[in-house]
Image (cartoon, rainbow, N blue to C red):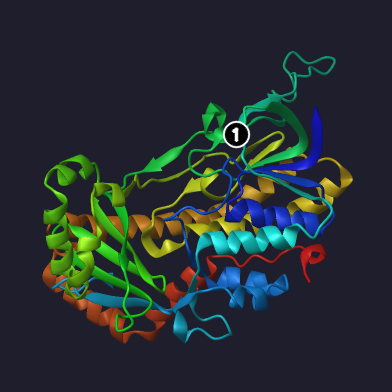
């Protein structure tokens, strides 16, 4: 039976940022990642100013700047009566060095974090290792009490490696960072609050040419919304389709979809033939939910494990990173002391919950008033005149452009890493 101070389940952005911060502060931390590498397409690749500022605090800004990336400064939504894109957030108008969103392959960011964390003797990363169950301590009943004070404290995880080996890793604290299908979500006492999502997403690639637009480009087609992310030599394309229509739309044929797609984005018409079959189009089942409780004794959930976000605004990765920063700041000293009480873990949820709720409310607003109408063939906000007035008002108002931009850039609360982790 093996032992560590903090077991981080999942090697995504939240897990790797938390592990780096804790390891720099001298806390023994072990990350379990079920895959053998980070090379997976169609993951969150938007790095917002809050994360860019964190990388500077950690002394990693220069190395991050050398990664291949594209920069985006505006957020646009199809608000006009003709479904034209209207700028609803101008991040470029914010003061400071980081007034842009960096579009960086997530595997490059993760490799950077792993390399830096690997310099710390208290850090350990186990690839090809999947957490399969939690280790539960027996209930303890203090004298004079009929019920246990702590019900089944989580004391670590059981794991299985890709070659079939199994084992147990005990930990003072286990942090679930393993996404929206997290092992922790099987615990009924954490609860789950779900919001309706009007769409699913198709992801695919198309070649990019030098004379193409730059950055993040959107379009609106027949009952779908498209977004193209500039990845240098190719476009990472997304098409939002009505929820549950994947099978029916695929049955209609790939050629029909590509005709609809090029009608919305005509400048890509000369290369849609590179999609050979539906195998090149991946489905994302879009969810918007959050756990009612992010913790129980010995366990903390952060990132998508605690709150699955919609792809609208591309802010899921940055909320997860901010969760990790807040968690590290609260956990460093208790973990150094060898114990973490439930009150400390609860403070992390209390700190991060308002930002999560506000962000999901904003996404629900976009779902209800923009995405759902467009996907059903109606004007955004249900009325062409109302959409026109709103789009003109937003376009002319500096205040309405800067407030959403700041919210998207930094969230409702800006998180600072623990002093022991900064360089």
Look at 80% across and 39% down and name the residue there: 4
Residue 376 visible to the viewer: no
Look at 81% across and 35% down and name the residue there: 3
Q: Position of residue 324 (x, y in %)?
A: 64, 55
Residue in front for this viewpoint, 394 or 252: 252
Image quarter for residue 223? bottom left
Quadrant holding the N terminus:
top right
In screen coordinates, is 310 left or right of 150? left
Q: Position of residue 302 (x, y in %)?
A: 59, 48
Residue density around tag 1, few if under 14, some if 14–19, many if 20 or more, within 10 Å: few
Mark 1 = which residue?
A: 162
Residue in front for this viewpoint, 307 or 134: 134
Residue 321 visible to the viewer: yes
Residue in front for this viewpoint, 40 or 191: 40
> Helix, strand, or loop for circle 1?
loop
347 is higher (above) or lower (below) than 258: above
177 is higher (above) or lower (below) than 24: above
Look at 15% across and 41% down and name the residue there: 248
Q: Position of residue 227 (x, y in %)?
A: 30, 66
Quadrant holding the C terminus:
bottom right
Residue located farthest toward the right when viewing the structure as drawn? 337
User: How many numbered tags mark residues here?
Assistant: 1
Q: Position of residue 6 (x, y in %)?
A: 75, 43
In screen coordinates, is 191 left or right of 261? right
144 is higher (above) or lower (below) than 211: above
């Amino acid at each position: 039976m093996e032992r560590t101070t903090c077991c981080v389940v999942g090697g995504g952005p939240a897990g790797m940022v938390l592990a780096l911060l804790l390891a720099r502060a001298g806390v023994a931390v072990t990350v379990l990642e079920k895959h053998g590498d980070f090379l997976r397409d169609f993951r969150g690749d938007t790095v917002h100013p809050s994360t860019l500022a964190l990388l500077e605090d950690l002394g990693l800004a220069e190395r991050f700047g050398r990664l291949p990336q594209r920069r985006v400064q505006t957020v646009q939504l199809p608000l006009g009566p003709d479904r034209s894109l209207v700028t609803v957030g101008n991040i470029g108008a914010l003061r400071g060095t980081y007034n842009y969103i960096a579009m960086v392959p997530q595997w490059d960011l993760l490799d950077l974090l792993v390399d830096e964390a690997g310099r710390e003797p208290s850090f350990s990363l186990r690839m090809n290792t999947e957490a399969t169950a939690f280790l539960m301590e027996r209930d303890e009943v203090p004298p004079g009490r009929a019920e246990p004070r702590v019900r089944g404290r989580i004391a670590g995880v059981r794991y299985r490696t890709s070659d079939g080996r199994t084992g147990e890793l005990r930990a003072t604290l286990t942090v679930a960072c393993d996404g929206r299908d997290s092992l922790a979500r099987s615990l009924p006492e954490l609860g789950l609050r779900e919001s309706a999502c009007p769409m699913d997403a198709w992801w695919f690639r198309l070649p990019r040419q030098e004379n193409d637009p730059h950055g993040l480009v959107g379009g609106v087609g027949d009952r779908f919304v498209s977004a193209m992310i500039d990845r240098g030599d190719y476009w990472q394309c997304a098409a939002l389709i009505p929820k549950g229509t994947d099978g029916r739309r695929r049955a209609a044929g790939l050629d029909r979809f590509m005709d609809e797609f090029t009608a919305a984005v005509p400048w890509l018409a000369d290369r849609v033939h590179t999609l050979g079959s539906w195998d090149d189009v991946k489905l994302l089942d879009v969810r918007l939910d959050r756990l009612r409780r992010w913790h129980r004794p010995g366990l903390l959930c952060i990132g998508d494990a605690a709150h699955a976000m919609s792809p609208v605004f591309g802010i899921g990765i940055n909320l997860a990173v901010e969760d990790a920063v807040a968690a590290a700041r609260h956990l460093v000293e208790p973990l150094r002391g060898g114990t973490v009480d439930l009150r400390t873990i609860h403070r992390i949820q209390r700190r991060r919950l308002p930002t999560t709720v506000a962000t999901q409310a904003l996404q629900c607003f976009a779902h209800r008033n923009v995405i759902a109408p467009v996907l059903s063939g109606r004007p955004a906000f249900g009325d062409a005149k109302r959409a026109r007035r709103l789009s003109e008002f937003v376009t002319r108002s500096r205040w309405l452009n800067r407030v959403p931009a700041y919210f998207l850039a930094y969230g409702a609360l800006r998180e600072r890493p623990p002093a022991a982790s900064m360089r």
